[in-house]
Image (cartoon, rainbow, N blue to C red):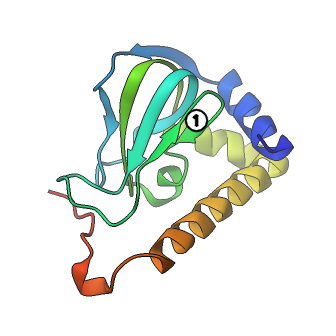
Amino acid sequence: MPKELAELVTELDRAASTVSLREGTPLFRCGDPVSGVFIVRKGAVRMSLDKTGNQFFPPVTLGPGEIAGLPATFTGTYSLSAEVVEPAELGFIPADRVMDLLECSPRLCLLATRFIGREIARMRSALSETPPLDHREECTPD
């Protein structure tokens, strides 16, 4: 894990409450209003663009020390879906608390911005390997 990501996780996790969830439990769905950010402490969470079973963006499995849902704190809605794929202990920070932390710490805000930048780069890389637009499924709220 990059040093900056570890620092971001550590700082966010200090403000987190603990949530223990079973396999198959959804954290959020693409299009849902943001509730907060999850930090995987134990177990695994699968992130995907998909809500229906058809997708062009390959799922990503997050493990301990990884963050789910941070970009949604800036946009107000989740752009991906997240589901627990093995029993997990997560840290949860409400979205308004995340924003308070970022507003109070320029360093933490910079780390979050870099994290989101990496997410954008990963998405662009995946998109460059996908079929033409008319064959893709898009996340749309219900």
Classify 10 Å Cα crowding around label 1: few (below 14), some (14-19), many (20 and above): some
Front residue of 88 and 69: 88
Q: Which residue is mark 1?
A: 97
Q: Quadrant of the N terminus?
A: top right
Residue 123 lies left or right of residue 31; in this view the side is right
The spot of residue 12 in percent (x, y) is: 68, 32
Task: Please give the name of the residue rendered at 41% of the width and 39% of the height, measured from the top-left corner.
Answer: 46
Task: Please give the name of the residue rendered at 41% of the width and 57% of the height, measured from the top-left corner.
Answer: 58
The spot of residue 42 in percent (x, y) is: 56, 18
The spot of residue 48 in percent (x, y) is: 37, 51
Front residue of 128 and 88: 128
Task: Please give the name of the residue rendered at 26% of the width and 69% of the height, measured from the top-left corner.
Answer: 138
Front residue of 120 and 135: 135
Identify the element where label 1 is drawn: helix
| Disc 1 residue type (three-letter) | Arg
Task: Please give the name of the residue rendered at 37% of the width and 28% of the height, measured from the top-left corner.
Answer: 85
Residue 87 lies left or right of residue 24; in this view the side is right
